[in-house]
Amino acid sequence: MSESWLELAIIGFIIAGIAVAIFKGGAANPETTGSLGRQVREVKSKVGILTGKVDEIERQVVGLESSSAKSFDLQRMERDVAELKREVGNLRESVAAQHADIEHTRRQVDRLYDFIVERGMSK
């Protein structure tokens, strides 16, 4: 007999659980109360705002990348500057050598001028 009371108690407990679930109508599901739906909408809204901000940051980064010099550009420019310095050094040497020649020629022309003037004045 105790088994039958135990079986009846278990059956009664199951039936009571089913009755409570039917009575509540599934209100334990947060979606039916709308709170989960509101939370999901709020999250979607915030994600949308963040997506817009991330897109703007990406555009700014792309703009910075396109306007900034790359490391290989800097290296190329450094090589170009070094080459220009070498060329300026070569030009400086060439001008110094020409200056000496020009100065020598100027002295010779002055001598000729003095000689011609002296000869012309004596006649």
Image (cartoon, rainbow, N blue to C red):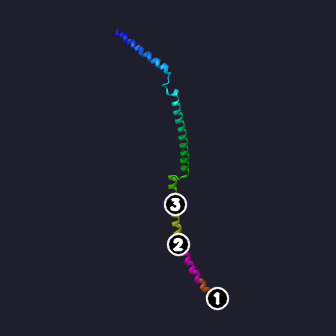
Where does the C terminus fall, quadrant-wise?
bottom right
- Left or right: residue 69 versus residue 117 is left
Q: Position of residue 116 (x, y in %)?
A: 62, 85
Residue designated by label 2 = 97
Q: Position of residue 99 (x, y in %)?
A: 54, 74
Report helix, strand or loop for mark 1: helix
**Residue farthest toward the top in the current orientation of the protein:** 1
Mark 3 is surrounded, within 10 Å at the Cα level, by few (under 14), some (14 to 19) or many (20 or more) other residues, namely: few
Predominant SS along the magenta part: helix
Of mark 2 and mark 1, the one earlier in the sequence is 2
Instruction: Work out how far the residue at label 2 is from the one at label 1, CA to CA, in angstroms.
Output: 35 Å
Residue corresponding to mark 1? 120
What amino acid type should be assigned to the residue bearing mark 1?
Gly
Q: Earlier in the sequence, mark 1 or mark 3?
A: 3
Query: Where is residue 59 drawn, in percent x and y?
Result: 56, 46
Q: Give the labeled residue for mark 3.
A: 81
Q: Residue at x 62, y 88 (%)?
A: 119
Badge 2 or badge 3: first in the primary sequence: 3
Which stretch appears magenta?
101-111
Seen in the picture, residue 108 relative to 26 is either above or below; the reply is below
The amino acid at mark 3 is Val
